[in-house]
Structure formats: structure tokens, C-alpha cells
Image (cartoon, rainbow, N blue to C red):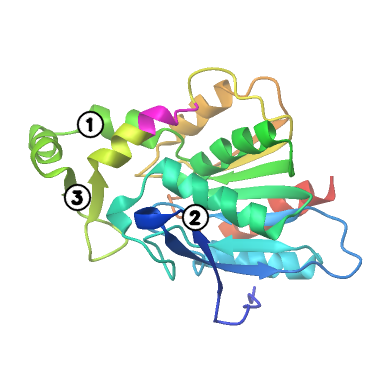
Amino acid sequence: MVASLLPSDPQFLTVGDGDSSRRIAMHVRPAAADGQGPTLVWLSGYRSDMAGTKAVEMDALAETLDLAAIRFDYSGHGQSGGAFTDGTISRWLEEALAVIAHVGPDRVLLVGSSMGGWIALRLLQELKKAGRPAVHGLVLIAPAPDFTAELIEPNLSETERTSLAERGYFEEPSDYSPEPNIFTRALIEDGRQNRVLQGIIATDCPVHILQGMQDADVPYTHALKLVEHLPADDVVLTLIRDGDHRLSRPQDIERMRDAIREMAAE
């Protein structure tokens, strides 16, 4: 698979006012002249960006299918402005809503990876309240809804709790970067206000979850729990026995492409 990249220079959209203002970088691929399908929207994971393998492959698939596509970087990520340590689920959700409102698609197919799966579920809720655009479907890759409350808080060490209380953040080594992961008190407190695993999640659209069973960051049991909160909708869960958290191997990318292709055609 060879991804067809957009020009390297992104467009920028200013989100927020005053001290909260930040420039959000985005790439928008227009649909073909006769394209009638949904706009694909990429939602990255924590500390990931729109130049990652899966994001670029989604964009290339959109080109193949004559679909529009949106990729963007959250503030503090990639080519966007703002400090990473100011980031919260609410802040990054606000940016996703602003980008979609700026582009103005009629229908969207949300593709969320890891934390992007959480953003996708919250985005779905907010778009349903607004009444547009319609959400055509969700493709969630190793989704991590409520990860601050479900996966981080219960496992905090006393040292990490002390660091949160005294410094407002704690650090932990990253398997994906030489720089440590930073989790702030603001992120964790805001996460409690954005929880989605507290009742039925009415998506009113199909959902396809891709989850590796060797995922060391988001255990596959978390995906099973998410499915329990999606009892009323068309949900497909694909468990990949030897898959890790990234799910970026060629065979994993092909599974993602197949899921998007099938859902976009519905």
C-alpha cells in the first residue's frame, strides 16, 4: 500500500479566544466531483498526529474511493499550536467540533484511534445534539474511552498521586517515544466530566471496533466493556489475536481499510 499524501503545508483554523486561542493544523481532501459518500474524519490518539501511518492510509483510501477526508492535529500535537500540557478531552473535542464545522460536511464517518476513539464517541454525542452533520458510522481502533478514569486512576502509584497533587502532573516512560508521557491533573479531572461508559451509548449508526489482544496499553477487555455499552446498535468487534496497540502492521492497516470501505458503502 502506498499512501497518496496531500501537500505538506496544512491549512490552519484558530479555535478559542484570548489566552485559549490556538492554531489548529488540518488537511482537507475534497471529494470527487460526483462523490456522494460520507466524509472520513481522522481522530488521533494521545501524542499522535495526522501524519501517522493509519491517518495517512485513511486519507489515501478516501482518494481511492472518491471521498472527502479530514485530518487535523489536536493542540499541542503535530503542527498545531498550543501547549500539550494544556490539553484535555474537552479542549481537543472543541477543536474537533470546530474543524468539522469549518469544513461543513453533510455526513461524517469517524475513524478514531486509541484516545481518538473516546473523542469520536464524545463527538458523536455533540453532533447529535447539534443535529448536523449526520454520523454515518464509527470505526474505532484500539479505542480508549474513559482511559483516565478506567485505566490510569485505578493504577496510580503513591509517587504518581503525590506528583499530581504537588506538581499538577506525573510522567511515565513511553514505549513509542524517547520523551516521557505526561498526564496532568487537568486532563484527569476533565476526563471525569467526559465519561461515556456510564450507560447506553446510542450511536444510531454502525460501529466497527478493531482491537489487538496483545495490546499492552488498552487491554482487549476494555473493548469488550465498550461493546456492553452499545447494545442497541450494529456493532462488529474484530479481535486480533497477535495485534498490539498500534495496529499499524500491513495486515492491520488492511483490516482498517476494509472496515472503512465497507461502512462507507452502506
Relative vertical location of residue 2 with respect to residue 109 in this rendering, above or below: below
Highlighted range, magenta: 191-196
Q: Given this view, does label 2 or label 3 mark the residue nearer the observer?
A: 2
Q: Position of residue 165 (x, y in %)?
A: 12, 35
Is residue 250 something one can see in this rendering? no
**Amino acid type assigned to the residue bearing label 1 in the image:** Asn
Residue bearing the label numbered 1: 155
Q: Position of residue 29 (x, y in %)?
A: 70, 69
Is residue 209 something one can see in this rendering? yes
Instruction: Say whether residue 45 is left or right of residue 99.
Output: left
Residue bearing the label numbered 3: 172
Q: CA distance from mark 1 to mark 3?
A: 12 Å
Query: For the residue carrying disc 1, how many other residues have a C-alpha within 10 Å: few (<14), some (14-19), or many (20+)?
Result: few
Spot the residue most to the front: 18
Relative vertical location of residue 35 with respect to residue 162 in this rendering, above or below: below
Instruction: Say whether residue 12 is left or right of residue 84.
Output: right
Quadrant where the N terminus sits is: bottom right
Residue bearing the label numbered 2: 44
**Amino acid type assigned to the residue bearing label 2 in the image:** Ser
